[in-house]
Amino acid sequence: MVSEDPTTIISKASWVIYWDWEKNRHRYGRDLDVVFKGNTIQYVGSEYRGKADRRVDGNGILVMPGLIDLHCHLFGGSVDKGVFDDIGAKALYGHALYTYSPLLQVWEEEGEATVEGALCELIQSGTTTVVDISRNYPGKMELLDRSGLRVYVGESFRQARWIDVEGRAVEYQWNEEAGWEGLSKAIRTVEALGKHPSGRLRGIIMPAQADTCKADLIKEAFKQAQILDVPFHIHAAQTLIEVHEIVRRHGMSPIQWLEELEVLGSRTTLGHCIFVDHHPWSPFRSEEDLRRLSRYGVTVAHCPTVFARTGMTLHTFGKYRKAGVNLGIGTDSYPYNMLEEVRNTVLFARTTGRSVFDTSTSEAFHAATVGGARALLRDDLGKIAPGCKADLVLVDLSHPSMQPVHDPLRSLVYVAADRAVKDVYIDGNHVLKDGRLLTLDWATSKRKEQEVQNAVLQRVSRLDPKGRSILEIAPLSLD
Ligand SMILES: [Zn+2]
């Protein structure tokens, strides 16, 4: 019963990033009380006069809305850590995706530790909502539920597998029926999660990639997302390999093709979306894709770190934003550190845009909160305001990495990152207390992750067509 929900007050927080509905943006407040009852924020203001069951001293604390990781592969992502950071296929724009990633096979029964490890890192870096696009296995929903996080589960499906041709081409091995079966399964998952008692687990509809699904499947998937009223998510304009393939098949850019399929809309999120027509590497001699994305209210899930490791990024974050494209931020694979993604968003935008004015700290923070919430069709996430969900991050202003504090968000984003994240509440529940996870076991999951990585790397020579060991394929950074 709602009336029995406890009321918690974070009393006189030194700094609060609250939402100003009138100005439609985050703002700083000083010495404010933040009060939540059950899973909902009740009050943000200078003096709460009601009674509270729990009191948290806000002195020396920044209270900010939890971050939304809009694009994340939880299963197996951390197994790649340290393996392919310095290599890629030279003739495939340096991507490791097609040639090397398939050599790291995580078995279903091995995956749990990698998922738990990733969830730990997300919470510790102030993430309260994650869109997980990765393999599901028996027991995964129980783990997601136990973590306390708000999770949108993307049961992704596709009709083609990428076949690497000795690092010089990518071919497509089609199984159309598998894609249709995948969509049916995804619909069942969305329906089942809609009834989940936590209210924190939900589904999305996600055809995996623009180049691995046929037109009729993508169209039907979008229709089902509309019927189920859930977000629609697809990797698009992710690599130039995909762009060239869509040009070969349809004679247009992936964005133009998705427009033709009538699947661009405010429930649509495009994963990565780097190689739009104006990108300097693209084959197109037009600059129309951003206007298309803006016209339909599409969101781009920007994952700066993973792609920057391959020398690629949006041209530019600021240019997308100025064109009116909604932007969210994701981690994709490791590191699962959303605060570092916010930092990298700003740094890469300014480097690529050759200007300090390309993207501000507040614009990147907006994307990591409200931008992601919009993509998830949620008005009650990513904001500190009465009526919004109590997804709160408490940052320790006295942490040496935050000091000296002039502007706490800048200290957090450019220096301290996860080191200063002290407490996290999700849906009103305390999940991180004084830097310690209350719902998950970081040490044990990391120990198991090491065992999984060892096993996965052992198997590489059997999967490699030339029978090479992992160190022959990808030597250590120093010999
Ligand atoms: Zn992805």
Image (cartoon, helix red, strand yellow):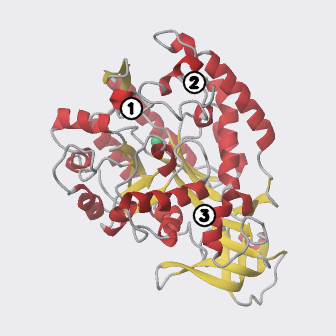
Q: Which mark is residue 158?
A: 1
Residue 231 is left or right of residue 59, and the answer is: left
Mark 2 → mark 3, Cα distance in angstroms: 31 Å
Mark 2 → mark 1, Cα distance in angstroms: 33 Å
Callout 2 amino acid:
Pro
Picture coordinates of residue 180, whole percent (x, y): 37, 31
Vertical placement of residue 198 versus 183, above or below: below
What is the secondary structure assignment of the residue under circle 2?
loop
Tell which tag, 1 or 3, sits nearer the viewer.
3
Mark 1 → mark 3, Cα distance in angstroms: 38 Å
Callout 3 amino acid:
Tyr
Picture coordinates of residue 364, whole percent (x, y): 49, 65
Foreground pick, 412 / 225: 412
Which of pointers 2 and 1 lies earlier in the amino acid sequence?
A: 1
Q: Residue at x 37, y 17 (%)?
A: 166
Query: Residue 168 occupies which quadrant of the picture?
Result: top left
Callout 1 amino acid:
Arg
